[in-house]
Image (spheres, rainbow, N blue to C red):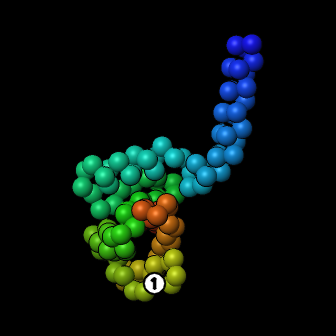
Amino acid sequence: MRKRVIFLLLLLLAVLFLLAYPILFQEGNPLSIAKGVIELSFYDKDIAKVSTKPLRYISKYSEGNASVIELMDKEGWTFVEQFGSGYLFSKGENNKILSSVQYTKKYRIWEIPSLN
């Protein structure tokens, strides 16, 4: 009897994991995103890097786009215009479009083409 209960619990956990898998991994590795959320929460950062390929950052949704504009400004890029979830930056003759995705109701993930 005990073996059946354990088997049923493991089966239930496996089914729940399969159902939750798309949500947990919707933006790639959830561990790197969790690390970024911890950096934002405990280290008083405005923006945190979550991956390098592709280059992605996470920021608090309540901060708007100020943190990513400041990050790009430090790299010499000037904010030009917003197109929905895309943000246009220029540096001399070069243009770069960043995209953002809302990740939960508190965070936003920014994907940035290489900064070179």
The count of marks equals 1
Residue 45: x %, y % from top left: 27, 57
Residue 82 sits above or below residue 52 on the image: below
Nearer to us in this view, 1 or 34: 1
Q: Position of residue 50 (x, y in %)?
A: 43, 52
Q: Please tell me in which quadrant of the rendered image residue 90 appears.
A: bottom left
**Residue 84 placement (x, y as % from top left):** 52, 82
Image-quadrant location for residue 116: bottom left
Q: Residue furthest left?
A: 44
- Residue farthest along the front direction in this orientation: 1
Please tell me which residue lies in front, 93 or 23: 23
Q: Is residue 63 positioned above or below 93 on the image? A: above
Badge 1, how many Cα within 10 Å: few under 14, some, many 20+? some
Q: What residue is shown with label 1?
A: 82
Q: Nearer the viewer, residue 3 or 24?
A: 3
Q: What is the secondary structure assignment of the residue under circle 1?
A: strand
Which amino acid type corresponds to the residue marked 1 in the rendered image?
A: Gln
Q: Quadrant of residue 94?
A: bottom left
Relative to 107, is 3 on the left or the right? Answer: right
- Horizontal side of 92 relative to 51 (left or right) equals left
Q: Residue at x 39, y 86 (%)?
A: 80
**Above or below: residue 10 compared with residue 102:** above
Q: Quadrant of the N terminus?
A: top right
Residue in the image at 46% along x and 59% along y: 56
Q: Residue at x 67, y 40 (%)?
A: 16
In the rendered image, residue 91, in percent from the top left (x then y), is placed at: 37, 80
On the question of residue 93 being in view, the answer is no
Q: Is there any visible trace of residue 18 in the rendered image?
A: yes
> Compared to 15, does 101 lie above or below?
below
